[in-house]
Amino acid sequence: MKILSEKIKLKYLIIGLISLAFLLSVASSLYSSYERSIALLEEQSLEKNRVYAQKLSQTANLFLEHSIKILDYSASKIADQMNDEEALNNEVMRLFHQQSSFNSVVIANSEGLMLAGAPDQYRLKGKTITSKEGLEQLKKQTISISDPYRASTGKLLITVSYPIFSSDGQFKGVVNGSIYIHESNFFEQILGEHHYHDGTYVYVVDSEGKLIYHVDKSRLGEDVSKNQVVQRLGHGDSGAQLVTNKLDEEMLAGFSPLEKANWGVVVQTPREVAIHSVGEQVLTIFYFELPLLFISIIIVLILVVKITKPLQQIATLTEYSINESEMGNLESLNAWFYEASQIKKALIRSLSFLHGQVSTLKDENSIDPLTNLTNRRALDSVLQSWTVQGKMYAVIMLDIDFFKSINDTYGHTIGDEVLKFLSFQMRNAVRGQDICCRYGGEEFIILLPETGIENAFDIAEQLRKRVESATSPSGKPVTFSAGIAGFPKQAANPDELIELADRALYEAKHLGRNRVVIAEAKNQL
């Protein structure tokens, strides 16, 4: 009986040790899961907010760029009409109604006198710009977006300013679009509504760390420059971090600078909200998994090697996933169980998308979206490369004659079609090794490697005759004027070469347009 008792005690001891080890293992596992879940949720929230802040920043930048382009068009339209009161009034009203995010629009002369303004209720016409920010924008004579300031109307606002220069290059004044911070459609349209409903909110600070947008409008103008995220924004940083706000609340904040306006966008979620479901998740997992753990422990030992093998292979291939050549290896991987198969499929989809995005970004960085010709950035790169190599080449710079008249007569849609038409004619007229580029607006450049200026002239003439004899999308023939210059015979670097070609183009227009002129070497000018 004593022996039996000792055996029973040993059995209980072993069971107790195993139970203790199991309980400690489960407790450790649950605690680790709890901590990992918190860390993962924090990381996901930080990344989500970082990406969202970057997206909002990019969207706001695009909006401001669009606003600047609209002001650019107005500035060029009224540059030689600054004494035409009716034309100025019509233009500010058009701008005010077209760009609904501007709360007011003014056209002022070089002395700051407002020649026209909209809406009429503010009676801006006849007033003079007196604010320091407005006077600085006049003094700079450049495109600018101000920090928030209080105007003579008493409104707290931000001004997007575009200089007006006459056709002879004289500074005539500015066309300004103003965004009233307390009444802004701009912030509400871009930042006010988002698809996250977990306590996440957005705020924007200016270059001095003051709030210029916040869901709580009573905080507008508040100085939050001591906030760590705001300080990092002040240094031009973007990213995400855990931060404690003025109310002593921990926030998971993502942030990104808004370069066009020197502002910063912050998206943040209360940490407590982000991780509140962790405890329930861990307990739910425990309740569901406990009955299976005893059975699973035996099965896991057998299957662990087999299960981990494809996962290890996937992890190894993922390290080199940036190379498209690894896609074949990933596709041929034997993922025999469901999770591995799903991970494999998800990775293939994700990597295919990534490679596609990389390819698209490469194209967007080098191709003009309207004409599908090489853009100016790629043009500069090619010129620099050829120059460093010492390669002989020629450039043809061409400009559509009377293009503004085409836009004014037939509209910008037909104008765009004319640009596409000329691009098509250029591609069909040049050789395989030549590069057709859109230089800007209605100006184009053709790069001809290993080509002298005489041969370049022949190619340009053939193209000119081809375009002249064809019917354009406007229903009538269009013509162009062109200037030719060659490297290294006529210029020592790309800048000089472009300048010579531009002068020759100007001479072609001066001589009556619809002609090609070869530039003289710089030392002959």
Image (tube, helix red, strand yellow):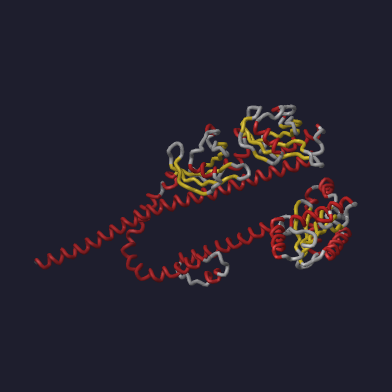
Q: Position of residue 8 (x, y in %)?
A: 15, 65
Residue beneath the point at 69% across and 63% down: 388
Q: Position of residue 237 (x, y in %)?
A: 54, 47
Q: Quadrant of the N terminus?
A: bottom left
Q: Choose top left, top right, bottom left or bottom right for residue 76.
A: top right
Q: Is residue 345 visible?
A: yes
Residue beneath the point at 42% across and 52% down: 39
Residue beneath the point at 76% across and 33% down: 109
Above or below for 117 versus 255: above
**Total residue callouts:** 0
**Image position of 259 (left or right of 301):** right
Q: Position of residue 221 (x, y in %)?
A: 55, 33
**Image position of 242 (left or right of 169):** left
- Residue farthest toward the left in the current orientation of the protein: 1
**Image position of 424 (left or right of 131):** right
- Residue farthest toward the right in the current orientation of the protein: 512
Q: Is residue 421 visible?
A: no
Q: Position of residue 382 (x, y in %)?
A: 71, 61
Q: Nearer the viewer, residue 494 or 164?
A: 494
Above or below for 180 versus 405: above
Residue beneath the point at 66% across and 27% down: 152
Q: Nearer the viewer, residue 63 or 225?
A: 225
Q: Choose top left, top right, bottom left or bottom right for residue 451.
A: bottom right
Above or below for 524 versus 305: above
